[in-house]
Amino acid sequence: MEVKEALLKRRSVRKFTEEPVTEEQINELIHAAMSGPIACNKRPWEFYVVTNPEMLKAFQSASRFTKISAPLAIVVCGNLKRALPLNMADFWIQDCSAATENILLRATDLGLGAVWCGMYPQRKPEKRVRELLGIDDKRIALNIIYIGHPAQEPEPKDWYEEACVYRVK
C-alpha cells in the first residue's frame, strides 16, 4: 500500500470481528510505533499490549469513549523518567503521538482497523487506565488504541481544507 493510500484509508474503526490479531501483526505495529520521530532520541514511550479479555472489558469503563470491544488494545504511555528535562518534558506527548499515528497507519496497511481513544489530559480516565495496568505515576497513559479486523469499513476521506493553509513567501 502506498503511503498516500494509507493516509486516506486510515479511518477510526469502532466495530471489530472476534478474529484475533496475530503476534506477527502485533510485532509489526510495535516496530512501526518505535520508528517514529522522537525528540533528542529520549524514547519516552512505552506500549502495553493487551489481549486479555477481562482487561479489555475493564478498559470499556475507563471513559465514555472507550466502550469498544476489540481483540487488542495498545496503551501508549509516556515514561516521565525518560522525558526531556525541565520545560521540555512535555515533548513526550509529541513522541507518543507520533508513535500512535505510526500504529494507526501500519494497522491500515495490514488490513486491520483501529481507533485512537485519548486518555491524557483527562485525569480520571488516565488514572483509571494506569490503575488497571498497575503502573506508577511516572508513566502517563496518553491513549488506548483499539485494534482488530474491521466489522465496518468507513469510506476513505480527504479532509483537505484550503482555508486552513497559509502560504508565506
Image (cartoon, helix red, strand yellow):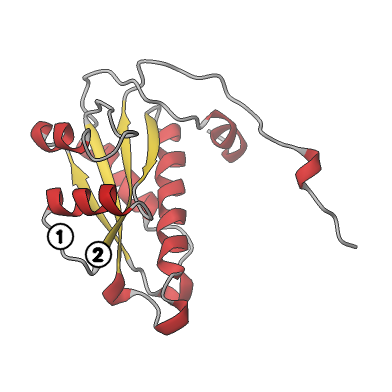
**Residue 29 x %, y %:** 34, 44
- Residue 137, image x and y in percent? 20, 66
In depth, the one of 64 and 58 nearer the eye is 64
**Residue indicated by mark 2:** 139
- Give the residue at the far bottom of this rendering: 86
Q: Residue at x 34, y 48 (%)?
A: 119
The circle on residue 76 is none
Q: Classify 10 Å Cα crowding around label 2: few (below 14), some (14-19), many (20 and above).
A: some
Q: Which residue is mark 1?
A: 135
Q: The residue tagged with tag 1: helix, strand or loop?
A: loop
Q: Amino acid at mark 2?
A: Arg
The secondary structure type at the circle numbered 2 is: strand
Left or right of residue 113: residue 16? left
Is residue 65 left or right of 54 when viewed as pictured?
right
* Residue 103 coordinates in the image, percent (x, y): 39, 45
Q: Nearer the viewer, residue 98 or 66?
A: 66
Amino acid type of the residue that numbered disc 1 sits on in the rendered structure: Ile
Give the answer, above or below, for where 133 lies relative to 162. below
Q: For label 1, count other residues whose C-alpha is less than 10 Å away and answer few (under 14), some (14-19) or many (20+).
A: some
152 sits left or right of 69 in the view: right
Q: Position of residue 87 (x, y in %)?
A: 46, 81
Q: Residue at x 24, y 25 (%)?
A: 69
> Rounded to the nearest whole Å, what is the CA distance between mark 1 and mark 2?
7 Å
* Residue sitting nearer the eye, 157 or 1: 157
Quarter of the image for residue 155 reads: top right
Asked if the residues shown at circle 1 and circle 2 are in contact, with their CB atoms under 8 angstroms apart, the answer is yes
Residue found farthest to the front = 124
Q: Quadrant of residue 127?
A: bottom left
